[in-house]
Amino acid sequence: MYLHEFQAKQLLLEYGIRVAPFHVVESLDDVEKAIEHGFSEAVVKIQVHAGGRGKAGGVKRAKNAGEMREHAKALLGMRLVNNQTGPEGVVAEKILLDTPIEFSHEYYLGVIIDRKTATLTVIASREGGMEIEEIARNSPEKIIVEQVPPSGALHHFQLMRMAKKLGWKEQDAKIIQKLLKAFVGLDATLIEINPLVETKEGLIALDAKISIDDNALYRHPRLEAMWDPSQQSRAERQAHEHELSYIALDGNIGCMVNGAGLAMATMDLIRYWGGNPANFLDVGGSASVEKVAEGFRILFSDPAVKAVLVNIFGGIMNCEIIAEALITVGCSKKVVIRMEGTNVESAKKMLAESKLDVIFKDNLDDAAKMVCTLV
């Protein structure tokens, strides 16, 4: 789950990482209240779940109250469209009024999960304020990387090594341990401060990005409440509300599968046979008829979807659940089904007797080939 910049900053403050004073506003009346509270100038930023805000005109410098009102009026409701958002874009329902800060240097500091080494990894650079991918591609020698021990904190010698490369004092390096503590405590999958700036008062996070592991949200009801449905498509909101693992893609073949690994293999085979998946949808192993039916509604309501591939391996999942859900919803698109496992024969019988226009295939390869042929 992605967080907005202002949410990320609120959390970093709780872990002792300094940020500039800010106001979050949702209306021009809120802007007036901020001005009344002494906000005379600001960096005005749209709050959306996407990067590239500055390049798209979503970040403005306001030198006085008049400019603050002017920029707020332009940015509230702005739709950001770039390669991260897709063609639909995302709308800024909130903007951040950030205190302008004078600084002498910009750094990049982040923590990620390195899948190759299966460790937390700290990434830093003296070249902050730019996209870290661009720095890594063009100047890899400017990227500083340290793998984090199982304790969740860097050894002292690792901290000192990073501090030396960044040109920091030992006191400055403590921010790395604070960031790691936040990462572990929040069950994050990414924390990024870019830029982290050097001021007379010390290091301050001017911008922040945090992603939370969805599977850990049951431990963090406060974080779960930070979910912003306005930043997702209608289908993704619908899936979230019914606890379905759904990710929209840009293809035209809808996929319903049980199990993440099987879903990935299904999408791979669709690509292999020349098709393009429209989504990732994992209904899980113990889904109810209502939950699976909602999954079908999401797929059938997508105008980009021309055909649907249902690939179910019934271990925990009962194939009859899938059949009953499809019969409940009906078929408004071409459907190819490959089912194996628990009650598969009775499920096929149910679908045959329903007279729904579905195509059965006995193996995944044939099913993938068939659905690609249909579109």
Image (tube, rainbow, N blue to C red):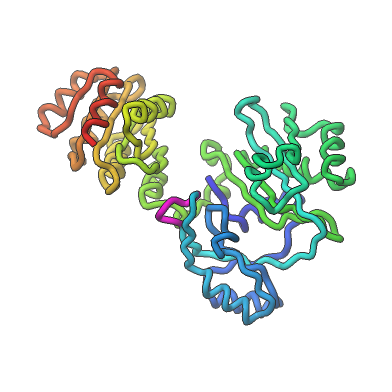
Q: Position of residue 200 (x, y in %)?
A: 86, 61
Tell me what residue is drawn at x 20 percent, y 36 percent.
334
Image vertical order of residue 194 relative to residue 294, above or below = below
* Quadrant of the frame with the C terminus: top left
Q: Position of residue 22 (x, y in %)?
A: 67, 65
Residue 139 in sight here: yes
Q: Position of residue 101 (x, y in %)?
A: 76, 65
Tell me what residue is drawn at x 85 percent, y 59 percent.
201
Between residues 174 and 33, which one lies in front from this camera angle? 174
Q: Which quarter of the figure has residue 346? A: top left
Tell me what residue is drawn at x 29 percent, y 46 percent.
304
Image vertical order of residue 155 relative to residue 243, above or below = above
Between residues 190 and 184, which one lies in front from this camera angle? 190
Q: Give, as a single range, the part of the protein colored magenta.
A: 84-89
Most frequent secondary structure within the magenta stretch: loop
Between residues 45 and 211, which one lies in front from this camera angle? 45
Find the residue positioned furthest to the bottom: 66
Indicate yes or no whether the magenta region holds residue 85: yes
Indicate yes or no whether the magenta region holds residue 119: no
Q: Position of residue 99 (x, y in %)?
A: 71, 67
Residue 183 in sight here: no
Q: Which quarter of the figure has residue 281? A: top left
